[in-house]
Image: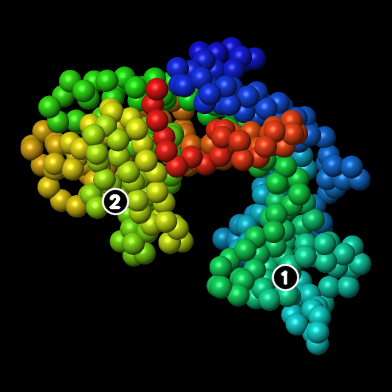
Amino acid sequence: MPGAGDAPVDSSPPTQRRHDRSAWLVLAALAASYRRAASVPSRGSSLKNAPLPAISFNRMADAASPQPVPLTNGLVYVDARMPGFTRVRHGRSFRYRDAKGHWLRDINELSRIRQLAIPPAYTDVWICPLPNGHLQATGIDARGRKQYRYHAEWRLLKDETKFERLELFGRALPRIRARVARDLRAAAKESSPGRAAVLATLVRLLDITFLRVGNDEYANSNQSYGLTTLRNRHVDVRGTSLKLRFRGKSGVLHEAQVDDPRVTRVIRSCQQLPGQELFQFQGLDGEARSVSSSDVNEYLRDAAGDNFTAKDFRTWHGTVQALELTRLACSGEPADRPSHASVPRRFSVR
């Protein structure tokens, strides 16, 4: 396992390994900078010394109401079910009431609310009465979706967590890829690939195509697919190559050609099993068993030795692509130059 200051060693193709290493080093630096930033209040901020307003929540609600919980950097964790401020339309603008129904007149409170920039179209608006609450406001948008406004310091903490997670995922990638390669090699000796081989194939596709893992609910209700919910009709196998073609989230058409003999062999075997679902394996009882996104995440946790999920692959590769595009822009190289940052349509193993 790499030391604290080392980038991970990988057996993936040289170009991918170079970009992954660069991304890992940048993410490690970003995570460190966010850790430093999170330990110091923002300029002009007095959160660390700001006392909680003199609000008695026990008098304002029953004992079952959620109570604020102190967090790091002077923040408190709040729940939108706790008593808060409400917004009332007043002509072409708005006025605000506190939990007791009194109009808000405090200049500082009104200024804080204005700075939240809650869209006028939002309904059922709840505003946190605490200036250091991690969640500052909620509302329902025009499409009926609940939206959230978070404290700037909370977003900083969340960004720190995000970069730390990506840094750790970068460290775990060599272990994941080694496990996948081992299971795919073992599958070549089996008459019918088992559960491990099918899951290794899915993780391999996650890693090289950047496609979503899939969700049964979306497949059944919206006919939008991801890797685990693909049907036999979504893949065309020819020789040692295969082509995926399906509609995913929001009806977006996805097409990808994969040149990987081991992956192709497993998928061809899956197609021989009864049923329309693509990714299946034959159980000990001879019955075909499908796999789900939960199975993929369990495989990843076991391979990585940490609590990573399929979504981390898309986050990782999206970050690598963004960093590579930034590098190309800064170096003056053509943006359309073939690179790991360009979303590929063909994926090969060399």
Instruction: Judge by depth and name the residue closer to the eye, 266 or 61.
Output: 266
- What is the crowding at mark 2: few (fewer than 14 residues within 10 Å), some, or many (at least 20)? some
Horizontal arrangement in the rendering, residue 284 relative to residue 258 (left or right)? left
Comes first in the chain, label 1 or label 2: 1
Q: Is 97 situated above or below 128? A: below
Name the quarter where the C terminus is drawn: top left
State the SS at label 2: helix
| Residue type beneath disc 2 | His
Instruction: Judge by depth and name the residue closer to the eye, 92 or 48.
Output: 92
Furthest residue toward left:
286
Residue under label 1: 119
Q: Where is residue 191 in the image (x, y as percent from the top left)?
A: 12, 27
Instruction: Judge by depth and name the residue closer to the eye, 223 or 169.
Output: 223
Residue in the image at 75% along x and 82% along y: 89
- What is the crowding at mark 1: few (fewer than 14 residues within 10 Å), some, or many (at least 20)? few
Q: In which quarter of the image is residue 281?
A: top left
Res. 327 visible in picture: yes
Q: Position of residue 181 (x, y in %)?
A: 34, 22
Res. 163 visible in picture: no
Q: Where is residue 205 in the image (x, y as percent from the top left)?
A: 38, 36
Residue under label 2: 234
- Total labels drawn: 2
Q: Is 125 situated above or below 8? A: below
Instruction: Judge by depth and name the residue closer to the eye, 142 or 51.
Output: 142
